[in-house]
Amino acid sequence: MEGDTKVIVYRLGANCDIGEVEEGKIYSGKVQGFATFGAFVLLNDRVKGLVHKSNIKVRHKEQDPILVLVRGIRPNGNIDLEEVTPSVFHTEVVVKKSAPVRLKDLQRSIGRVVQIQGEVSQVKQTSGPTIFTLVDGDGIASGAAFVEAGVRAYPEVQLGDIVSIMGEVMQRNSQLQVEVSSLAVMTGDEALHVREEIDLTLDIRAEPPELALLVESTVLAALVPAMREVARRIRKAVFMGQPILVRHHADADGISAAVSLEQAVIALIRENGGDFDSGYFLFKRAPSKAPFYEIEDITRDLDFSLKDLVRYGQKLPLIILMDNGSTEEDIPSLRMAAVYDLPMLVVDHHHPDEVVDPYLQGHVNPYHVGGDFGVTSGMLGVEIARLVHPSVEPLVRHIAAVSAVGDRSEAPERGRYLALAAENYTEEHCKEIALALDYLQFWLRFNDGRELVKDLLNLNGNEERHRALVRHLVDQANLAIAEQVEASMPHVESRMLPNGVHLFLLDVELHAHKFTFPPPGKTSGEVHDRLIQKNPNLPVVTIGFGPDFAVLRSRGVLMNIPQMVRELRQEIVGGGVSGGGHLVVGSIKFVEGMRGQVLEALIGKIGGAPVQPR
């Protein structure tokens, strides 16, 4: 036997008994003690046998490791062993042939040795053990395997593998953990069966509950199938232990949509076995300055996600774009995400371009069902949050009203969501919350301001602090707006266009304070509001422009800004025109040297647009 490279030595798993021992096979064990007729050998804590003194090859002491051949198993259960000393061999772990414990049932198995099976969703190397996170469709659990401090146990195990683990269930810092005694990667039909079972269980669990909409709405009712599909994919990601990253436009509407969903996802993660910290370890929210997914955004997201993959053994995330993601401008970033097979969902109310859909696994947009931007992303976010985890409804339903007034919706849904929130949140208070969100996000830049935003939206349960913070931020915002408008209004130029539109132009680069609140877009909006007041019942368009951009606000003019951008890009060679937004509210970028030509061409298109009847 010595020198045989095909020798297999079996190691009994901790839960194995005599039923897993076979005659003619070699097992690893340790010497338990001695008698006059030989040595007792433990094959594991449950199974032992005897090596007759005539079959002992080497002098041993208690607890010494030993390799033994099973010569026979007697009817009374006694096992006859013979010591063997192969110089070359490889080891295989024997796993008890018993039904594995479902991860959701581990709580009932504390202190017991169990077998669990599932898909590896994370492999994290700590300064001590290697932590393997498993999902089986019903739940999620961690197994700790230790070979040496900081050394990777079972290096052959990769993300996505189907594995079988044997170990004792322990409670560590209020969390369940399996102390791994053996771990094996499952292959072939056995692995396929487990994976199919996981997929089936996940599909059933991920199906959202049947819920009525919070308000009556033809548009929202038509969007229910799309919202349910997005909610289903989000729930499935949580149950699979996949991280979720939400990217949202950095305004009151985008924040409202994303924060509503955040509350639901965090609640579901914790319900599924995650602790307080793991909720935000598996969920991240990040604002986007532009109303589309910029290359800067996807580059940051990929950088952090790939680092987490290497550092924490964490899956790449499901990315959800809220209040952005529907337009042609998103394509470069969506293509970059596709290189890494990042799954993408979009919840948006900007006018959509069909070219984005091949890159998406789900897309909720009111334009798909005959609606428009009046159904805000915040309204959609609240309804989807309820589908993800219904328990958050009392916490977030007022947020739909905040988004409605913050995004200046004139749709019938605006009044219905305001009525729903009216008992605790007046329309004026909702407007103040929206303004405070815009003001706070300006100073947060790229940070999510998680707890501050929760206080502003009254999600932390401290009503007094909520109202004091809103009041303070609104005072500061209004003071800044007043100063900005006072400086800007004397420099507004006006024109009368052929279609009867009153056009107002403001160079916000020269006649507004820079690098402070309100930024150019909001400055243009505030100036526009005052011009509307001075020109009641008349069609008005305001253009705030700088060296290489223009921001449009309008009332009573049936424009299509995304279409204008496409036409200008084709018509003005060397203009570098890009941009978009809603049909009648948006922004345009261009190269500085072509500003005059682009602006005049833009004004020409506005002058040819239809005007709403008075």
Image (cartoon, helix red, strand yellow):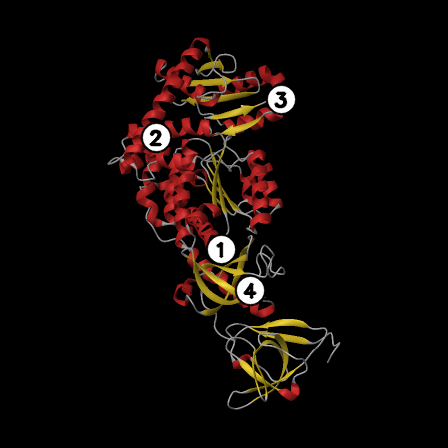
Q: CA distance from mark 4 to mark 2?
A: 49 Å
Q: Residue tagged by mark 2?
A: 433
Identified at 55% across, 36% down, the residue is: 297
- The reply, left or right, for residue 5 in relation to residue 234 is right
Q: CA distance from mark 1 to mark 2?
A: 35 Å
Q: Which tag, 4 or 3, sits closer to the chain's start?
A: 4
Q: Which residue is mark 4?
A: 163
Q: Identify the residue under disc 1.
A: 240
Could you classify mark 3 by the number of other residues whose Cα lies within 10 Å: few (under 14), some (14-19), or many (20 or more)?
many
Kind of residue sitting beneath label 1: Met
Reading the chain from its start, which is encountered first: label 3 or label 2?
A: 2
- The quadrant of the picture occupied by the C terminus is top left
Q: Earlier in the sequence, mark 4 or mark 1?
A: 4
Quarter of the picture containing the N terminus is bottom right
Whether label 3 touches label 2, CB < 8 Å:
no
Q: Residues within 10 Å of mark 2 (few under 14, many from 20)?
A: many
Residues tagged 1 and 3 counted as in contact (Cβ below 8 A): no
Number of numbered discs present? 4
Q: For mark 3, what is the residue? A: 575
Which mark is drawn over residue 514?
Answer: none
Amino acid type at circle 3 is: Gly
Task: Residue type at mark 4: give it.
Answer: Val
